[in-house]
Amino acid sequence: MNAAKFREVLEDLRAIMEKEERSYGGGERRGGVIRLRSRGTFGLVGDVHGDHETMLRILKDVEGQAEAIAFLGDYIDRGPPEGQVRVIEELHRLKASMGEKAILLRGNHEPGWGILSFPHDYPLALRRLFGSAWRELYELSVKLFESMPHALIIEGQLLALHGGPPVEPAADPFEYLAHGREEGRLVEILFNDPSEEVEERAPSPRGAGYLWGPRVTRRALEIAGVKLIFRGHEPAFRGYKLNHDNKVITLFSRLGAPYYNARAAYALCSPEDLLKPEGCLRTFG
Ligand SMILES: [Mn+2]
């Protein structure tokens, strides 16, 4: 992969995203929020963070079986430089072949619009691989990240996002999930973490977003009209963890340094599985 080829990948992937934002055939899309009607088996993948090898193992299983697949964000930062770039190439391949049936949500490690997370080694990875072309490729990457949707509702079934639901309610799910990418709510959606220690909300030790409690989960499920929340953002030793009476499922879909979780997890869920979400979780290590 040379700089010219990677530039093409970044530009084409962004063009696909922006086209979908203008016209979404398979459901309703407003800005960064997608709402789909109930579907068949759905694949969900958590944080990848440059682990291309694990991503391929997951896709091998999911692609043949799932009608559609959603990634929960955090594609880059960490992992070898080549891995980070290959993950983005793989996302491009998926979008090119699956179109709207591959949904690439944004994570807090996809910077832009005042979103920046540390450590952020992606620019260093680009510099190492592409020399002085890194700056242009980085700017194109940020434009791509800003074009990504950040929340997915599958009606009656699930809400998928990277961090968590906003703590303040809103009457309408699109307002609630910041379809216009209102900055405060977007920061929460990308950074929030569930907690069993708080009922409602507490400041996050991350310095951005909140820890949210079961009351916020109940409210979010009601506003979105769904049964479960799938999110990524936190490493989990078994690759997944369950919070708030098993209504919040965290998926962490990468292996190796610097997390050393024993297993990576993803989900492959039919609508019936969602009544008992543990049944659709798959792990390997
Ligand atoms: Mn994250």
Image: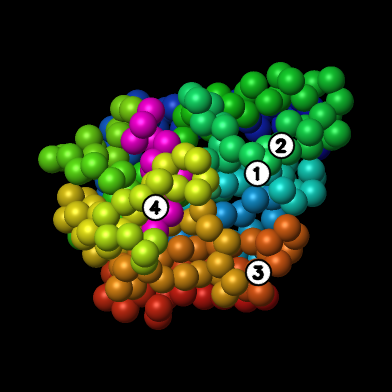
Q: Which of pointers 4 and 2 lies earlier in the amino acid sequence?
A: 2
Task: Tell me if residue 273 is in the magenta stretch.
Answer: no
Q: On residue 261, which mark appears?
A: 3
**Which class describes the residues within 10 Å of circle 1: few (<14), some (14-19), or many (20+)?**
many
Instruction: Find disc 1 in the rendering and name its residue.
Output: 76
Task: Tell me if residue 185 is in the magenta stretch.
Answer: yes
Instruction: Find disc 2 in the rendering and name its residue.
Output: 122
Instruction: Find disc 4 in the rendering and name its residue.
Output: 211
Tell me: residue 97, above or below residue 244: above
Secondary structure beneath label 2: helix
Q: CA distance from mark 1 to mark 2?
A: 6 Å
**Which class describes the residues within 10 Å of circle 2: few (<14), some (14-19), or many (20+)?**
many
Q: Is residue 219 left or right of residue 3?
A: left
Residue name at image x 44 percent, y 27 percent: 18
Q: Which of pointers 1 and 2 lies earlier in the amino acid sequence?
A: 1
Q: CA distance from mark 3 to mark 4?
A: 22 Å
Q: Nearer the viewer, residue 71 or 49?
A: 49
